[in-house]
């Protein structure tokens, strides 16, 4: 390349799809690289998913866990944000197909030199997508607000119900899946009924709320060591949650859940509120990318990537986070995995532009945490296995540290401190614009 060509050549266009944990870190790691970065996301905010359940149970408001992407990258001069859904990818032409843009015009295409895809995962209803209507999930902010409306609405319905059988159905909450999200949700709903709402209602005794945690496996928190699963189970029972281990949900409707604990051994639970926190799969874009590159996906829909997180035969296409699976070295779908992968990819792109060959990605395991209601958590940090108050304090510290934005950290700390003293939950508004089961579309959030 001549000197003149070097001077006038355009910086490489790096397109990052997904402003979640992984994509954002990739963008940030490119802040000093001689590239132009376009961050494309179908929503205008980064959602701190680990605290979505607190929005769903009124402990935090939506704006405390969702931060506008534009404000996150506003100081990064080589980055811009595009609000659009990526609907397809053409690896030969090096361009993405976009859905409608905010001005309601057709999205067209977006060219790239280097592509980073980090579109995360969603819950899988194991082929029963019809259940979604009756059992919303917590993966999105919309899901969290829908769940909040359903939980609070169920207590309101119980308050005005004359028929004791129906009253109990309104006061029965079924959570499907006893991973960290299911356990956290169950603990919070139990405390909502026993503690927060106790004095707010006149006719109904909210302490009569039944919280059932249904899990196919024989223990809760299957990703933790068995001793911590036992501790978590004891804590759940202490705060009034009923775990149904070894039970599989085989049907969900507006009025009931059917569970099976052995072939043919089915029972029906009358429940008006069901929350889905079981099984994950990836977005349709992951499948399209895999097809285009001719690389396999695993049973959870995750695309296979090389040790340097590129797709086989596509050195300029990276996939990371929940949607990707490193061949022969799979990692769990956790925020620290996505974040470390995002940082790695940002550095790898810079290294390659500087003519260096990046070393393969290596994950540094910093541990695993889950909280079970107020004051109790379990933690695995290196060889340490901690349960109880100390683990809970650790959980608080880690979540505050990882929450994006100083203002949000401060607000969440204040909110938690206030709730700690008063046992209250400040965000218990049932959004009038979003009745449960409402269809997609713009919404205001509180
Ligand atoms: C309720 C819940 C609780 C959790 N708790 C914990 C926890 O306590 N600790 C922990 O470590 N992990 C936790 N996780 C897991 C953690 O949140 C994920 O591992 C992490 O979010 C994965 O990051 P990611 O970047 O791969 O995807 P995400 O953070 O999910 O981001 C994906 C982004 O891609 C965007 N997107 C998707 N498709 C498209 C498209 N076609 N076009 C444009 N944009 C698109 C989405 O809008 C989103 O912003 C939890 C997850 C959930 C759902």
Image (spheres, helix red, strand yellow):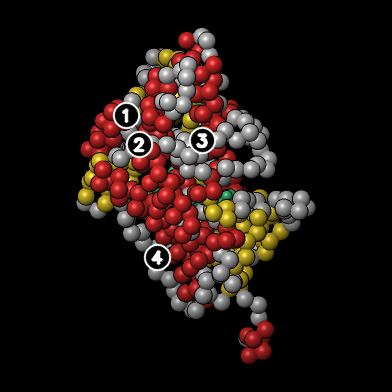
User: Gap between marks 3 and 4, in whole Å?
Assistant: 47 Å
The residue under the point 63% across, 51% down is 42
Earlier-in-chain disc, 1 versus 4: 1
Earlier-in-chain disc, 3 versus 1: 1
- Does the residue at mark 3 contact the one at mark 2 (Cβ under 8 Å)? no
User: Gap between marks 3 and 1, in whole Å?
Assistant: 21 Å
- Vertical position of residue 74 compared to residue 366: above or below: below
Horizontal side of residue 39 vs 332, given as left or right: right
Check mark 1 vs ligand 1: CB closer than 8 Å? yes or no.
no
- Vertical position of residue 425 compared to residue 293: above or below: above
Q: Which residue is mark 3?
A: 428
Q: Which residue is mark 4?
A: 360
- Does the residue at mark 3 contact the one at mark 1 (Cβ under 8 Å)? no
- Vertical position of residue 187 compared to residue 112: above or below: above
Tag nearer the camera, 1 or 4: 1
Q: Which residue is mark 1?
A: 239
Total numbered circles: 4
Instruction: Assign a secondary structure to mark 3.
Output: loop
User: Gap between marks 3 and 2, in whole Å?
Assistant: 17 Å
Earlier-in-chain disc, 3 versus 4: 4
- Does the residue at mark 3 contact the one at mark 4 (Cβ under 8 Å)? no
Q: What mark, if any, has residue 373 been given in the picture? A: 2
Check mark 4 vs ligand 1: CB closer than 8 Å? yes or no.
no
Tag nearer the camera, 3 or 2: 3
Q: Quadrant of residue 238?
A: top left
- Can you see residue 126? no
Tag nearer the camera, 3 or 1: 3
């Amino acid at each position: 390349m001549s000197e003149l060509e070097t001077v006038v050549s355009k910086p490489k266009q790096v397109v990052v799809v997904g402003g979640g944990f992984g994509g954002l870190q990739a963008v940030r790691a490119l802040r000093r690289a001689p590239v132009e970065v376009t961050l494309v996301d179908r929503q205008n905010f980064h959602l701190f998913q680990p605290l979505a359940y607190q929005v769903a149970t009124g402990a935090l408001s939506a704006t405390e866990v969702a931060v506008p992407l534009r404000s996150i990258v506003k100081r990064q001069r080589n980055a811009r944000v595009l609000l659009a859904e990526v609907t397809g990818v053409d690896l030969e032409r090096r361009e993405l197909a976009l859905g409608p843009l905010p001005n309601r015009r057709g999205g067209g295409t977006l060219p790239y030199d280097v592509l980073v895809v980090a579109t995360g995962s969603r819950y899988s209803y194991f082929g029963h997508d019809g259940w979604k209507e009756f059992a919303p999930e917590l993966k999105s902010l919309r899901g969290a607000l829908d769940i909040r409306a359903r939980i609070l609405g169920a207590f309101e319905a119980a308050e005005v119900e004359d028929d004791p059988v129906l009253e109990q159905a309104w006061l029965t909450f079924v959570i499907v899946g006893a991973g960290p999200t299911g356990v956290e949700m169950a603990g919070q709903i139990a405390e909502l009924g026993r503690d927060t709402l106790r004095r707010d209602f006149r006719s109904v005794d909210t302490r009569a709320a039944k919280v059932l945690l249904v899990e196919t496996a024989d223990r809760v928190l299957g990703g933790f060591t068995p001793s911590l699963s036992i501790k978590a189970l004891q804590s759940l029972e202490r705060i009034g949650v009923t775990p149904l281990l070894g039970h599989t949900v085989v049907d969900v409707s507006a009025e009931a859940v059917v569970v099976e604990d052995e072939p043919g051994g089915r029972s029906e639970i009358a429940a008006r509120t069901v929350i889905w926190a079981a099984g994950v799969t990836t977005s349709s874009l992951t499948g399209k990318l895999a097809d285009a590159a001719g690389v396999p996906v695993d049973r959870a829909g995750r695309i296979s990537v090389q040790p340097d997180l590129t797709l086989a035969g596509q050195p300029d296409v990276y996939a990371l986070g929940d949607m990707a699976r490193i061949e022969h070295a799979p990692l769990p779908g956790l925020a620290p995995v996505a974040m470390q992968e995002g940082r790695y990819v940002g550095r790898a792109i810079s290294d390659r532009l500087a003519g260096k060959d990046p070393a393969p990605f290596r994950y540094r395991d910093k541990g695993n945490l889950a909280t079970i209601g107020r004051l109790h958590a379990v933690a695995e940090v290196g060889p340490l296995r901690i349960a109880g108050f100390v683990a809970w304090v650790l959980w608080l510290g880690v979540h505050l540290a990882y929450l994006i934005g100083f203002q949000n950290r401060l607000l969440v700390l204040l909110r938690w401190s206030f709730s700690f003293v008063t046992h209250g939950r400040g965000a218990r508004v049932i959004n009038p614009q979003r009745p449960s089961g409402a269809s997609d579309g713009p919404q205001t959030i509180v």
